[in-house]
Image: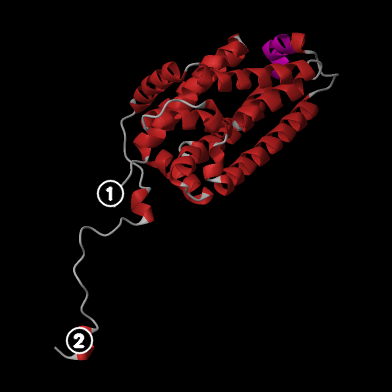
């Protein structure tokens, strides 16, 4: 065989070629009720990790109580900042994802390790946290502006909140405030369904994780709606009834989010 031809001959591959990044991160298509399985798996994780997961739930509840205490006389700030705090939920739950990851790998749950798990992808997770913080700040400012534009009198205290909400004169404002809040919450939900677990598990770039998350939502709109409704029901009930419920509901949602990630973005061979 001529030398020129020998240079073009390639040895056969031993096995399949590695899957491209787009294939490795391709979202699966799941049934609408798949989130129920995520919640069930999340509950098993919560029971297994015990006080370690409850520690994170207590952090959620403590922050909510602190915001309510500091801004008791300015409830317009309390509502905006509390809502904004929960926009940061996907990042705050990083340690909960790590606890689920440890259990999945057959390792004993380790609270100390979960607190520093972000070090596996500090750049990606840090940038994503900055994105969420930026959105939280914008939402807090927008919330205050909306209150200021709609108020003709001095802001009421926390004790007057329910009366203000029930007042027919505030229906237009509440509709606007809720609509704007829905836009912010929807944006955060779209970019964070699987983002942080993916960065934590695969060391993915922030934008790759964000686009994969948005794509997972686009591929599974029905399941995404059920999942969003489940989060709103669990966290919303805790906010309305008693913040102490977050000790259970916040870790439950966090653990379930890990299983949502595993189901929505399964590993491709190669």
Quadrant in the rendering for residue 141: top right
Q: Secondary structure at mark 2?
A: helix
Task: Identify the residue shown where x is 50% and y is 28%.
Answer: 96
Query: Residue 19's spot in the image, x, y percent?
Result: 31, 55
Query: Residue 150's spot in the image, x, y percent?
Result: 77, 26
Task: Name the residue beneath numbered marker 1.
Answer: 269
Q: Residues within 10 Å of mark 2 (few under 14, many from 20)?
A: few
Depth check: 242 or 31 in front? 242
Query: Residue 201's spot in the image, x, y percent?
Result: 44, 41
Quadrant the N terminus occupies: bottom left
Q: Is residue 15 above or below residue 135?
A: below
Find the residue positioned furthest to the right: 154
Depth check: 25 or 59 in front? 59
Q: Residues within 10 Å of mark 1 (few under 14, many from 20)?
A: few
Q: Does any portion of residue 250 appear in the rendered image?
A: yes
Task: Identify the residue shown where x is 54% and y is 18%.
Answer: 54
Query: Residue 249's spot in the image, x, y percent?
Result: 51, 17
Task: Name the residue beneath numbered marker 2.
Answer: 5
Task: Please report the bounds of the magenta region as a residue range.
Answer: 161-172
Q: Is residue 245 above or below residue 126?
A: above
Q: Is residue 164 above or below residue 187?
A: above
Q: CA distance from mark 1 to mark 2?
A: 33 Å
């Amino acid at each position: 065989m001529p030398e020129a031809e020998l240079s073009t001959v390639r040895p056969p591959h031993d096995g399949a070629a590695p899957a491209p990044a787009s294939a490795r991160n391709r979202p699966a298509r799941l049934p609408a009720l798949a989130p129920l399985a995520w919640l069930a798996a999340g509950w098993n994780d919560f029971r297994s990790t015990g006080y370690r997961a409850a520690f994170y739930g207590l952090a959620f509840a403590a922050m909510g109580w602190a915001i309510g205490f500091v801004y008791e006389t300015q409830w317009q700030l309390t509502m905006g900042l509390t809502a904004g705090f929960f926009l940061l939920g996907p990042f705050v739950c990083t340690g909960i994802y790590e606890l689920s990851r440890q259990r999945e790998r057959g390792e004993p749950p380790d609270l100390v390790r979960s607190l520093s798990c972000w070090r596996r992808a500090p750049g990606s997770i840090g940038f994503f946290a900055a994105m969420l913080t930026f959105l939280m700040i914008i939402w807090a400012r927008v919330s205050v502006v909306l209150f200021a534009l709609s108020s003709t009198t001095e802001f009421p205290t926390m004790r007057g909140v329910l009366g203000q909400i029930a007042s027919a004169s505030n229906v237009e404002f509440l509709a606007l405030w809720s609509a704007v809040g829905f836009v912010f919450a929807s944006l955060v939900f779209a970019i964070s369904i699987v983002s942080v677990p993916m960065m934590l598990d695969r060391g993915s770039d922030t934008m790759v994780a964000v686009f994969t998350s948005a794509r997972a939502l686009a591929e599974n709109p029905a399941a995404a709606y059920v999942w969003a409704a489940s989060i709103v029901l669990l966290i919303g009930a805790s906010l309305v009834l008693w913040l102490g419920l977050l000790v259970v509901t916040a870790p439950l949602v966090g653990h379930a989010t890990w299983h949502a990630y595993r189901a929505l973005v399964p590993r491709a061979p190669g």
